[in-house]
Image: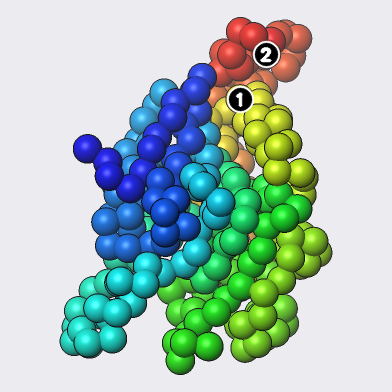
């Protein structure tokens, strides 16, 4: 029984709601564990083709839970390492999920909350959303979330926001590439549903392989090894059931079998 999350299922989609609104969806050990398990389960569920991560209440996620922070101050290094590894496992699980993932961001999105957003494939934010990497003001560093934040905004932008710990708005988040779309808060679901509809037109296998392609090739030089690798991937994909079906459907001027009847 989930205690910190709610999962709402739609047609071939799932919305994972952070459900600790009284503490602005702050991350504690239970929430981290339940998120990890939920994304693993949804990643393996053939009935779910896309996942949305959202927050109940007035915030997307305020970062670390205060009680967890109090405990960490007196915990051993080994215990703190174990807690940190749990967070790294969560972020890696979201990042490597074979299904497209969308972060639905509203209100405050702080520290670890930004880790959740940047571990997702796409972020859609309300114009009133606010962001910050506050770790340095607590004498800490944004270590576990750094690979994902750096991937989203680059080292130069990170130099400002990691070091200053300033709060910045959704327009700045969009400008630097942290979020892909901005809208009014009451339009979030409309924008996200449009993206979900786009995913339904694509092959589930091709989506998973495209995500793997991005992860594997990001930052690599375009050398002979990359040329061979990309050619081999396309050849392999053409031989899959989805590859064969997609090309046949295109030539026959029909919708491929993975497209829901309502979207044909």
- Total number of numbered discs in the rendering: 2
- Image quadrant containing the C terminus: top right
Report the residue marked by disc 1. 200
The percent position of residue 151, horizontal first and vertical second, equals 61, 68
The percent position of residue 78, horizontal first and vertical second, equals 19, 83
Q: CA distance from mark 2 to mark 1?
A: 8 Å
Dot 1 surroundings within 10 Å: few (below 14), some, or many (20 or more)? some
Residue at position x 61%, y 82% in the image: 165
Residue 264 against residue 210 in the figure, above or below:
above
Badge 2 element: helix
- Image quadrant containing the N terminus: top left
Q: Is residue 31 left or right of residue 71?
A: right
CB atoms of marks 2 and 1 within 8 Å: yes
Q: Is residue 258 left or right of residue 189?
A: left
Badge 1 element: helix
Residue 179 lies in what quarter of the image? bottom right
Residue 108 lies in what quarter of the image? bottom right
The percent position of residue 249, horizontal first and vertical second, equals 67, 14
Residue 153 against residue 261 in the figure, above or below:
below
Residue at position x 47%, y 87% in the image: 138
Find the residue positioned furthest to the front.
22
Residue 102 lies in what quarter of the image? top right
In the image, which disc is placed on residue 51?
A: none
Report the residue marked by disc 2. 263
Q: Let me know if residue 208 appears in the view.
A: no
Dot 2 surroundings within 10 Å: few (below 14), some, or many (20 or more)? few
Residue 55 against residue 197 in the figure, above or below:
below
Q: Is residue 183 left or right of residue 213?
A: right
């Amino acid at each position: 029984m989930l205690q910190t999350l709610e999962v709402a299922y739609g047609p071939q989609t799932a919305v994972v709601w952070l459900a600790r609104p009284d503490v602005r969806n702050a991350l504690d050990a239970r929430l981290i564990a339940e998120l990890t398990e939920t994304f693993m389960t949804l990643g393996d569920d053939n009935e779910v083709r896309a996942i949305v991560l959202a927050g109940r209440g007035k915030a997307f996620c305020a970062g670390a839970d205060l009680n967890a922070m109090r405990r960490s101050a007196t915990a051993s290094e080994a215990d703190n390492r174990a807690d940190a590894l749990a967070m790294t496992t969560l972020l890696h699980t979201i990042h490597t999920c074979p299904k497209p993932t969308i972060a639905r961001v509203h209100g405050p999105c702080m520290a670890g909350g930004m880790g959740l957003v940047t571990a997702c494939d796409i972020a859609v934010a309300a114009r009133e959303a606010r962001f910050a990497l506050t770790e340095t003001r607590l004498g800490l560093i944004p270590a576990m979330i750094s690979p994902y934040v750096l991937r989203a905004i680059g080292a130069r932008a990170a130099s400002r926001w990691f070091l200053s710990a300033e709060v910045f708005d959704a327009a700045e988040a969009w400008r630097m590439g942290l979020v892909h779309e901005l809208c009014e808060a009451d339009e979030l679901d409309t924008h996200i549903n449009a993206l979900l509809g786009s995913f339904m037109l694509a092959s589930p296998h091709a989506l998973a392989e495209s995500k793997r392609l991005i992860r594997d090739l990001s930052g690599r030089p375009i050398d002979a090894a990359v040329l061979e690798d990309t050619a081999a991937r396309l050849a392999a994909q053409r031989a899959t059931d989805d590859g064969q079906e997609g090309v046949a459907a295109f030539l026959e001027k029909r919708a491929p079998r993975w497209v829901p009847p309502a979207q044909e």
